[in-house]
Image (cartoon, rainbow, N blue to C red):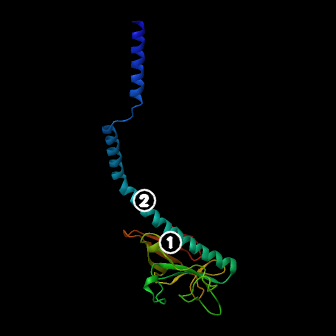
Amino acid sequence: MLVCNMRMKASLSEKRRIHRLRGFSLPELLVVLGILAIIAAVAMPYLLAAARNSDFDAAVRQVAIDARFARSLAVARGGLYRLHAGLDPALGNPALNNSYRVEHRDPAVGWPAPTAQMGSSADVLSNWQDLSTLYGGVTVQGVVDGTLAAIDGAIFNSTGASVDTSNALRSVSVTLQKPDGTTRVIQIDPAGNVRMP
């Protein structure tokens, strides 16, 4: 009898151990997957909006960085450097409307031709950057001076100041827009300081 009781106890403890190692049942797994699906459905719009905002923030930062790059080159190397907007009517190329590049003005020749590329021209410091392609539909809405007149970009002289073609000081605003219509304006003051919103 004692042996029989010991076998029953061993058998019960083994059954409990096996029961604990069994895992989850199919209904339990389905409930957990259902909860995860609901959480994902609720969170997805927020994640998509965050991704769109991230692209827009990156586009604004990139344009501001390149404007600062043009300014630093003007100070370090002397001469005129600019952030040239593709909206420039003199370009006559609507495909460049959402583009910009950094250029140097050769005193003997002037600004580089719109078709000039890095490598073939020492005055082209970056090829055309198309914001709508690089940053999910972000567009350049306008580049204006302090009087709200449309201009071809921001020009920096050897002191780092923002100037026009006659070397007079001017402020510049570069407006970027994301597909939902939200805009952000990068401000360049006459001293050449570049500010992002």
Looking at the image, which residue sits at the far top? 1
In this picture, residue 74 sits left or right of residue 174: right
The answer to which of marks 1 and 2 sits earlier in the sequence is: 2
**Is disc 2 surrounded by few (<14), some (14 to 19) or many (20+) residues within 10 Å?**
few
Q: Secondary structure at mark 1?
A: strand
Residue 149, image x, y percentages: 46, 84
Q: Secondary structure at mark 2?
A: helix
Q: Identify which residue is drawn at 35% across, 41% down.
A: 32
- Quadrant placement of the N terminus: top left
In the rendered image, the vertical position of residue 54 relative to residue 171, given as above or below: above
Which picture quadrant has residue 35?
top left
In this picture, residue 109 sits left or right of residue 6: right
**Which amino acid type is marked by label 1?**
Ile
Mark 1 vs mark 2: in front: 2
Q: Which residue is mark 2?
A: 50
**Which amino acid type is marked by label 2?**
Ala
Looking at the image, which residue sits at the far right? 77
Residue 142, image x, y percentages: 45, 79
Q: Which mark is residue 186?
A: 1
Q: Which mark is residue 79?
A: none
Q: Identify which residue is drawn at 40% across, 23% down.
A: 16
Residue 60, image x, y percentages: 50, 69
Q: Identify which residue is drawn at 57% across, 77% down.
A: 190
Q: Nearer the viewer, residue 139 or 187?
A: 139
Spatial CA span between label 1 and label 2: 21 Å
Q: Nearer the viewer, residue 190 or 78?
A: 78
